[in-house]
């Protein structure tokens, strides 16, 4: 069912992990941490725009392709637009539900797909900017809107008259002459109503509404706590001497960060939401490394205003109660029924299969790192805050290079235009033209018009790559306008990264991880831009959570594809191409440290499942959160002191949002990704016919077909896990 109809664009309180696509209505909160809120004076660039007499959300945008009028939108417009949008939407739904004519596909399903346009417009912009460029006023509106949107969703999904019409058409489906996408709309909408409690008694419906409203409030508070604490616990350093090991640009950026916080002369290292922090790979000061990591790991569980322990136990218990109210054993079982995995047993088996070889690799890596410490005269046992630092030392020793050697060849604009865009041109025939005439919400955001191979306009693409205090951490994609044949919409999509902005006049040089992230996020963008479906419900990335990361992971393969790399990996000063031997070292080290990387990811995934496979009475109290976490990791066989989980429970924003019981999705999708990479290689790699096949059979289909059926149509076979095991070095030694 159309996510905007059910107010699920509130899920832009989410993706994506790295992806900010539509997610089930079940958990209406962001999936990743946002960055620091700005003060009112630092708020959106739009605040200085003249006040318009008419709320810009009240009418469709008059700009090209319904592009949002960012230059007209002010904070004061959001709440009235939400309230008016919900009123209008409920009126439309009531007219559908009480229609005196017998229920038909047109007067019920098509009508629902077309409803809620105002609510969709404001939701998409508001929740996108609450992640990309927030401020105190947006924060207040979000806190007020979250429970209202939850109640709004319930008022639709629990509407008995509306469900009766949906059910009557579903029951008669075999007698209707509908095309396959329309049939799927009926079946998926029916399942969504059932999963939301449409068949419950009136008493149970009221109990469910209360749970959903409370969850919306709690999960919103969780995300705000994470936001506030990430900012409050940024690491402050008095002297540049303590930052030895960082580049001059990094040190200068930390000094600028200090000035931005009114700490002139101080050096500030912001925290990311992951457990490990990027600076740990370079900082020579071991005590500072320890301070940074322990601060990171203690977030949400150290007391004070932002302690999330009591909050998370309430969330886990409420989710478990809701699942049992709906007839499921636990929240994980409830969530997974709509995913490609389908069962907790399937997820548990996949994670349990990968954990032992990953841990074995991590322990071998630990032994190698400890040997290096000893070789250098260190008289200490390697700890978690030492891992990244000695890993880079060992990488340099073993492969005779460190990643900093790559950065001069990875200037950001060049990577985008001559790398990411060039790969899309070669594979799909796309071309790109900058549109400086369209307004943006921040000077660092830029708009591109995307043209198809025949010269027609395919989409608009917004790039927003620099980190700032008003942006949440991580990287993600979202859609301001989703493609729909029914509504005549072409897509307007955005990619957001968090690349540190260098001092004025300095080039933006990327790490290899940032390069692959840019390719990854553009894979999500392509999924949205290539969408060719009729119904908004199925547009672009409206696919199961454990499938949505797959196309974006595939797009990473072009980052080091020789023809693409040669086109963008050029020295920012001399134009000299990256030496082949340097790339060979990158590729040769691709399995390096994979034991650690896979183990920290699996540890987080296993924590997610451990919490969400509890019944209500099994959820511990706030005081027991850390003990439960430790025991869960030990039981799963991934408890290694030197390898903390990528996220701990108290700042694990993915599982407070669209990835609850779904963080396993990345590894699940990576099985499909690795197998698809093999297909491309088997069929000649970077060729238009390969891109056209991938686009036609998979990228364009959105959610209009079953996800695994789409994969098998593309691949011609069931997915094979062996390529992933080989990629990660998890095959038998």
Image: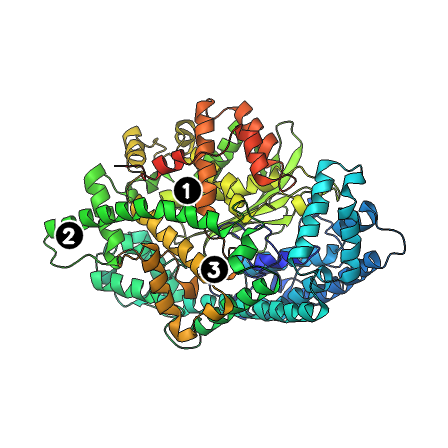
**Label 1 vs label 3: CA separation?**
36 Å
Q: Can residue 400 be seen at all in this image of the molecule?
A: no
Say above or below: 19 vs 472.
above
Q: Which residue was labeled with disc 3?
A: 613
- Picture coordinates of residue 420, whole percent (x, y): 48, 37
Quadrant for the C terminus in the image: top left
Write down the quadrant of residue 319 in the picture.
bottom right
N-terminal-most mark, 1 or 3? 1
Q: Nearer the viewer, mark 1 or mark 3?
A: 3
- Picture coordinates of residue 710, whole percent (x, y): 58, 35
Residue under the point 39% across and 34% down:
722
Decide which of 245, 708 is in the foreground and name it: 708
Q: Can residue 570 be seen at all in this image of the molecule?
A: yes
Residue under the point 65% across and 62% down:
49
- Picture coordinates of residue 292, whole percent (x, y): 30, 63
Which label sits on residue 373? Answer: 2
Per the image, label 1 sits on a secondary structure element best described as: helix
Q: Nearer the viewer, mark 3 or mark 2?
A: 3
**Label 3 vs label 2: CA separation?**
40 Å
N-terminal-most mark, 3 or 2? 2
Per the image, label 2 sits on a secondary structure element best described as: helix
Q: Is residue 578 left or right of residue 344?
A: left
Count of all numbered marks drawn on residues in the image: 3
**Label 1 vs label 2: CA separation?**
30 Å
Which label sits on residue 124? Answer: none
Write down the quadrant of residue 430 in the picture.
top right
N-terminal-most mark, 1 or 2? 2
Q: Which residue was labeled with disc 1?
A: 515
């Amino acid at each position: 069912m159309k996510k905007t109809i059910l107010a699920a664009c509130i899920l832009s309180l989410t993706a994506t992990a790295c992806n900010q696509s539509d997610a089930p209505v079940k958990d209406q909160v962001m999936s990743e941490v946002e960055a620091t809120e700005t003060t009112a004076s630092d708020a959106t660039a739009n605040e200085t725009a003249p006040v318009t007499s008419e709320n810009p959300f009240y009418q469709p945008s008059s700009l090209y392709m319904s592009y949002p009028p960012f230059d007209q939108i002010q904070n004061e417009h959001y709440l009235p637009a939400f309230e008016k949008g919900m009123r209008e939407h409920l009126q439309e739904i009531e007219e559908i539900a009480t229609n005196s004519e017998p229920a038909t596909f047109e007067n019920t399903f098509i009508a629902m797909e077309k409803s809620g346009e105002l609510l969709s417009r404001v939701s998409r912009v508001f929740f996108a900017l609450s992640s990309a460029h927030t401020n105190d006023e947006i924060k207040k509106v979000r806190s007020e809107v979250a429970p209202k949107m939850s109640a709004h969703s319930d008022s639709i999904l629990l509407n008995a008259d509306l469900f009766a019409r949906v059910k009557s058409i579903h029951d008669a489906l075999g007698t209707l002459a509908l095309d396959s996408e329309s049939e799927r709309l009926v079946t998926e909408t029916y399942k969504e109503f059932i999963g939301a409690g449409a068949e419950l008694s009136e008493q149970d419906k009221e109990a469910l509404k209360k749970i959903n409203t409370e969850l919306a409030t709690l999960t919103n508070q969780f995300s705000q706590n994470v936001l506030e604490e990430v900012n409050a616990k940024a690491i402050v350093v008095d002297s540049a001497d303590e930052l030895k090991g960082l580049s001059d640009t990094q040190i200068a950026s930390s000094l600028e960060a200090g000035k931005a916080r009114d700490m002139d002369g101080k050096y500030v290292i912001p925290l990311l939401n992951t457990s490990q922090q990027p600076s740990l790979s370079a900082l020579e000061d071991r005590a500072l490394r320890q301070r940074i990591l322990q601060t990171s790991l203690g977030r949400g569980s150290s007391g004070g205003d932002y302690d999330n322990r009591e909050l998370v136990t309430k969330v886990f218990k409420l989710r478990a109660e809701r699942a049992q109210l709906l007839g499921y054993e636990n929240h994980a079982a409830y969530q997974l029924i709509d995913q490609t995995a389908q069962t907790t047993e399937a997820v548990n088996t996949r994670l349990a299969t990968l954990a032992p070889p990953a841990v074995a690799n991590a322990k071998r890596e630990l032994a190698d790192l400890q040997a290096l410490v000893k070789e250098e005269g260190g008289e200490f046992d390697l700890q978690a805050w030492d891992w990244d630092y000695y890993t880079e030392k060992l990488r340099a020793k073993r492969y005779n290079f460190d990643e900093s050697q790559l950065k001069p060849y990875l200037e950001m604009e060049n990577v985008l235009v001559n790398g990411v865009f060039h790969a899309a041109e070669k594979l799909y025939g796309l071309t790109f033209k900058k549109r400086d005439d369209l307004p943006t919400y921040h000077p660092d955001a830029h708009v591109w018009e995307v043209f198809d191979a025949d010269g027609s306009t395919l989409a608009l693409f917004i790039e927003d790559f620099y980190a700032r205090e008003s942006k949440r951490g991580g990287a993600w994609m979202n859609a301001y306008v989703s493609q729909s044949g029914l509504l005549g919409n072409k897509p307007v999509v955005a990619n957001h990264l968090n690349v540190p902005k260098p001092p004025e006049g300095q080039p933006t040089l990327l790490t290899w991880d940032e390069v692959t992230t840019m390719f990854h996020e553009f894979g999500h963008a392509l999924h949205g831009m290539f969408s060719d479906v009729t119904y908004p419900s199925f547009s672009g990335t409206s696919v199961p959570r454990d499938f949505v990361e797959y196309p974006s992971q595939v797009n990473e393969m072009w980052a080091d594809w020789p023809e693409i790399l040669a086109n963008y990996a050029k020295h920012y000063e001399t134009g000299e191409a990256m030496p082949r031997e340097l790339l060979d070292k990158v590729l040769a080290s691709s399995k390096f440290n994979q034991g650690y990387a896979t183990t920290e990811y699996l540890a987080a995934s296993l924590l997610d499942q451990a919490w969400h496979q509890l019944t209500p009475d099994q959820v511990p109290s706030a005081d027991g959160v850390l003990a439960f976490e430790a025991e869960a990791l030990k039981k799963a066989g991934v408890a290694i002191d030197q390898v903390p989980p990528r996220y701990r429970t108290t700042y694990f924003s993915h599982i407070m949002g669209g990835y609850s019981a779904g963080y396993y999705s990345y590894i699940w999708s990576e099985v499909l990704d690795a197998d698809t990479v093999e297909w491309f290689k088997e069929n000649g790699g970077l060729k238009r016919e390969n891109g056209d096949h991938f686009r036609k059979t998979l990228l364009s289909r959105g959610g209009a077909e079953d996800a695994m059926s789409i994969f098998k149509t593309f691949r011609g076979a069931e997915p094979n896990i062996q390529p992933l095991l080989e990629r990660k070095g998890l095959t038998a030694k």
